[in-house]
Image (spheres, helix red, strand yellow):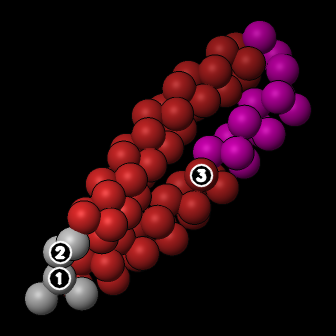
Amino acid sequence: MDAEMKELDALLDYLIKHNKDHAEEITVLAQKAKGLGETAVYDNLTKGVEHMERSNESLERALSILRGKER
């Protein structure tokens, strides 16, 4: 794998992990909002996490395809 492919692989891997970390943080915030009775805030934060998870699925598929081309 050449340098540009390695960089793309590393960046995709980083973004996936980064998004997962942020999704966890947002989930904690959503729970705090829910505890404060802020259901609309909770709902929107939860939806945001769902979007991040779907985004990560696309990133993971892209990474899988990229890694499949290593062979």
Residue 25, visible in the rendered structure:
yes
- Residue carrying label 3: 52
The label nearer to you, 3 versus 1, is: 1
The residue shown at (37%, 63%) is 8
The label nearer to you, 1 versus 2, is: 2
Q: Residue at the right extreme?
A: 40
Q: Residue 63: image x %, image y %?
A: 35, 70
Q: Amino acid at mark 1?
A: Glu
Q: CA distance from mark 2 to mark 3?
A: 29 Å
Q: Is residue 61 left or right of residue 27?
A: left
- Residue carrying label 1: 70
Tag shown at residue 40? none
Q: Residue 40: image x %, image y %?
A: 87, 32
Q: Residue 48: image x %, image y %?
A: 70, 45
- Residue carrying label 2: 1
Whether residues under marks 2 and 3 lie with C-beta atoms below 8 angstroms apart, the answer is no
Q: Amino acid at mark 2?
A: Met
- Of the two numbered discs 3 and 1 on the same chain, state the one appearing first in sequence: 3
Which element type, helix, strand or loop, lies under badge 1? loop
Tell me where residue 64 sits by quadrant: bottom left
Which residues lie in the magenta part?
Answer: 36-49
Q: Residues within 10 Å of mark 3 (few under 14, many from 20)?
A: some
- The question of residue 30 being in magenta is answered with no
Q: CA distance from mark 1 to mark 2?
A: 6 Å
Q: Quadrant of the N terminus?
A: bottom left
Q: Residue 9: image x %, image y %?
A: 31, 63
Whether residues under marks 3 and 1 lie with C-beta atoms below 8 angstroms apart, the answer is no
Q: Residues within 10 Å of mark 2 (few under 14, many from 20)?
A: few
Whether residues under marks 1 and 2 lie with C-beta atoms below 8 angstroms apart, the answer is yes
Q: Is residue 51 above or below residue 65?
A: above
